[in-house]
Image: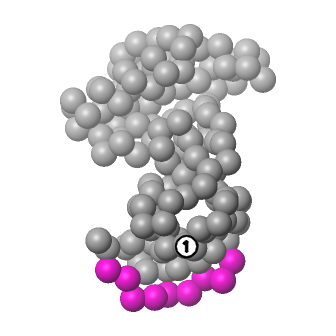
Amino acid sequence: MKIISYTVTQDGEHVGKSPIRDQAVNAAKMRAKATGKPVTVTATLDDGRTKEVIYHPDGFIQKIWEIAQSSPFCPEVGKTYRNAGGGSFRCERASGTEAWMTNVKSGWRFKAHGCRAYFDGSIEWDYSTDGEFVKFVEI
């Protein structure tokens, strides 16, 4: 299925519409930041179905995978990344698209396999192994 348009709304009020994803995304980001409230972008598919993502004032995009494809990604050691599903993770060790990541809030460390990134800079991974809690201090 192909996305044919994007509609931007906030609190049920129509803000704008565009056939271009980046234009709708930028409008949603700017409005969320300016108002301090979440903004919804609804993608309409050519078969009439819709998919929604929510842009939060802090830059988090809820359900980004509904409107965007991720690409293989090689994390950098020492860098902290925002997960597409929520949370922040620091890369401790990396080799290609596999990395040892630590959740900066909980201290849960694990090996992430198949790391991927979205256009907004958020990341995710296919699956994780070898998880354990460690004492962790955010830098």
What kind of residue is marked 1? Arg
- Residue 5: name its quadrant: top right
Q: Quadrant of the N terminus?
A: top right
Residue 130 seen in the figure: yes
Above-or-below relation of 45 to 54 = above
Q: Residues within 10 Å of mark 1 (few under 14, many from 20)?
A: some
Q: Quadrant of the C terminus?
A: bottom left
* SS category of the residue bearing label 1: strand
Task: Give residue 50's position: percent from left, percent from top.
Answer: 63, 26
Please report the residue visible at 21 percent of the width from the left and 29 percent of the height from the top: 34
Colour style of the rendered protein structure: one colour
Please report the residue visible at 30 percent of the width from the left and 40 percent of the height from the top: 57
Magenta-tinted stretch = 129-137
Please report the residue visible at 67 percent of the width from the left and 59 percent of the height from the top: 97
**Magenta region includes residue 136:** yes
Please report the residue visible at 55 percent of the width from the left and 58 percent of the height from the top: 75
Report the front residue among 62 and 83. Answer: 83
How many numbered tags mark residues here? 1
Is 117 on the left-hand or right-hand side of 69?
Answer: left
Residue 12 seen in the figure: no
Above-or-below relation of 128 to 26 = below
Task: Give residue 89's position: percent from left, percent from top.
Answer: 46, 65
Report the front residue among 74 and 124. Answer: 74
Task: Give residue 101's position: percent from left, percent from top.
Answer: 53, 71
Report the front residue among 134 and 52. Answer: 134
Is 117 on the left-hand or right-hand side of 122?
Answer: right
Above-or-below relation of 122 to 89 = above
Residue bearing the label numbered 1: 93
**Magenta region includes residue 85:** no
